[in-house]
Amino acid sequence: MPGYIGQVKVERALPTTEAAELLDLVGDVARDTLAPRAAAAERESKFPRDAFMTLGRMGLLGLPYPEDHGGSAQPYEVYLQVVEELSRAWLTVGLGVSVHTLSCFPLARFGTDAQRARWLPGMLGGALLGAYCLSEPDSGSDAGALRTRADQTDDGYLLDGTKAWITHAGQADFYTVMARTSDDRTHGISCFLVPAETEGVRAGPPEHKMGLRGSPTGQLELSGVRAAPDQLIGGPGQGFTIALAALDAGRLGIAACAVGLAQAAFDVALEYAGGRRQFGRPIGDFDGVGFMLADMATGIEAARAVYLAAARRADAGVRFSMQAAMAKLFCSDTAMRVTTDAVQVLGGYGYVEDYPVERYLREAKALQIVEGTNQVQRLVISRQLRRE
């Protein structure tokens, strides 16, 4: 297969020399270790658990969290560019880092000091992988309608229900689970940390997906799962607030994933347009192709700027919910458009597995759906605009 990773140098404005060195290291690992494995693993639906162990040893599974609990204390501006670089090489890995970071968010942000000291070092240290459990078979965009219950007992809680569309289902070492502790709709949802080995936790078979086949997605069955009182994150009924805050951060992760995927598709298209000759000239010399490449490059630069602007708001402690929705919406739509155009630039070769752009196109579609469909993002944005 032709070389396709790192053909285009991405100029990045990074806040520190340390951050620049980190991105260089991640780029080397992504190019030399991850990218060569991606096509075969996606074709065979093989989850690269070992890759996450490697990233964990590098400290990449706890980048935006405090050092005193095993994190790296990097700003979101840097963390998200790491996610982008990983996604450029292999979306399954970039998405996996984003999902793991999302699954740690409730404990890191809303847990007590004792809870963080007990669990967070293991979650951020690299040996463990997490999953985030909000959606259910009948509760997707309407998260407040979830039915999984956590009934209080003399010694804690008893969880019963089914979660759906769970990234890392069956592979995760812990699950961050939203469950109902009362019938007060959004005010009756609570957040629990559930180790995967807990009795009554069972992952269903992986879904057969259009793309991202190396990343397992499935249902999680909770049947009589016992949770101690200290496995409740935040107070009873605080889960919906926690979930929304986590999704704000998680949507920035998806935005970064989308930009990395779009960049990968552009790399292939640009290289191909320079090497493929028709009528005695490289096809990139023809305006029909050259203008497509110009639009692709412009869209990627704009998308990167959008998610980084939102990240800087998050780092500054400024409200960024609307900007996170904008970033997720714009970046994933851009990825869909860029990957579609990349297939067109390659023509027939873009439609077959000889080149990776057909896979990129299939993967891009998922990013318009996960962590809130793009229709939901428009709803979030429009409501915020009316409030303001």
Image (cartoon, helix red, strand yellow):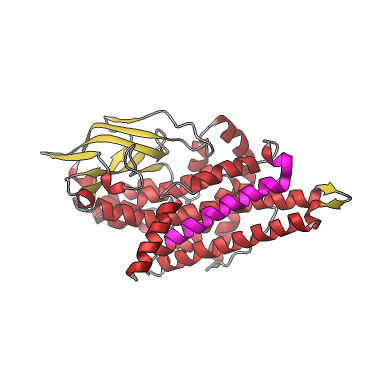
Q: In which quarter of the image is residue 135?
A: top left
Task: Residue 207 in the image: state x and y as whole percent.
Answer: 45, 32
The residue that appears at 36% across and 37% down in the rendered structure is: 164
Residue 162 visible in the displayed image: yes
Q: In this view, does 369 lie to the left or right of 150?
A: right
The residue that appears at 84% across and 48% down in the rendered structure is: 277
Query: Quick one: quadrant of the C terminus?
Result: bottom left
Residue 108 visible in the displayed image: no
Closer to the camera, 231 or 72? Answer: 231
Q: In this view, does 176 lie to the left or right of 348?
A: left
Task: Residue 214 in the image: state x and y as whole percent.
Answer: 52, 36
Q: Quadrant of residue 286?
A: bottom right
The residue that appears at 23% across and 51% down in the rendered structure is: 186
Task: State which region is magenta.
Answer: 324-350
Numbered disc total: 0
Main secondary structure of the magenta stretch: helix
Query: Quick one: quadrant of the N terminus?
Result: top right
Q: Which residue lies furthest to the left in this view?
A: 154
Residue 8: in magenta span: no
The residue that appears at 21% across and 49% down in the rendered structure is: 185
Task: Residue 216 in the image: state x and y as whole percent.
Answer: 46, 35
Task: Residue 50 in the image: state x and y as whole percent.
Answer: 51, 37
Q: Which residue lies furthest to the top in this view?
A: 205
Closer to the camera, 60 or 146? Answer: 146
Closer to the camera, 358 or 175? Answer: 358
Residue 336: in magenta span: yes
